Amino acid sequence: GQQLNQSPQSMFIQEGEDVSMNCTSSSIFNTWLWYKQDPGEGPVLLIALYKAGELTSNGRLTAQFGITRKDSFLNISASIPSDVGIYFCAGQPGTASKLTFGTGTRLQVTL
Amino acid sequence: NAGVMQNPRHLVRRRGQEARLRCSPMKGHSHVYWYRQLPEEGLKFMVYLQKENIIDESGMPKERFSAEFPKEGPSILRIQQVVRGDSAAYFCASSPGMESPLHFGNGTRLTVT
């Protein structure tokens, strides 16, 4: 089946630093999504990408849909303590098809 | 507009009992998905339903697990004769259409003792 490799697995950064994480797939996706999950809660959608090469921002977050359709990255600028959590990428190969999730990047922000 | 509502938030069952997990999608959403998450892992797809129809159940074990999304009422994920390995967080997500992003509920944490 499809696999999504997400890296890094975890990050420890200081408040104010920028963060970059990425996701690669063994196969092509038509949609890339980035979610954040806080402890005890469900994933919350951050950014959705629908076209190869698309670059989309949501506040301090920026994500890009790779040209090859097999990768995506998420950047967080000027991190703050509330950015702490687990970030998941997810890919969808086509319409009416299930999302495949990455293994997550755990972000810790120190003051 | 309320989000995806799941209940119960926590469920404890003894081995051999049945577990029923409920999910009410967001208003106007007719597509429901169930995912399972083990500690320190990502979410794994189980089943995708539209009203009264199962569209894709390729991620759901063929035995003991079933799902439904009736014309009226919430979607139900049912696990019969639970075993300890069923302990996990079960998340429901909904969307208004096939190409729309999924919105997740806060999950039901099932513990089998």
Image: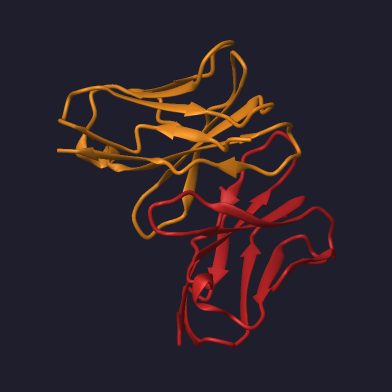
- Residue at the top extreme, as displayed: B71
What residue is drawn where x is 25% and y is 22%? B18
Residue plotted at (49% across, 77% down) = A81
* Residue B61 image position (x, y, % from top left): 40, 30
Residue A69 lies in what quarter of the image?
bottom right
Residue B99 screen position, x and y as percent: 76, 39
The residue located at (56%, 65%) in the rendering is A5
Above or below residue A73? Residue B24 is above
The residue positioned 20% from the left and 23% from the top of the image is B17
Please indicate whether residue B35 sits to the left or right of residue B12 in the image.
right
In this view, the residue in front, B28 or A52, is B28
Residue B89 at x, y = what percent? Answer: 37, 44
> In this image, B102 relative to B90: left or right?
right
> In the image, is residue B69 above or below residue A63?
above
Q: In the image, which lettered chain appears red?
A: A
Give chain B's shade.
orange
Residue B104 locus on image (x, y percent): 55, 43
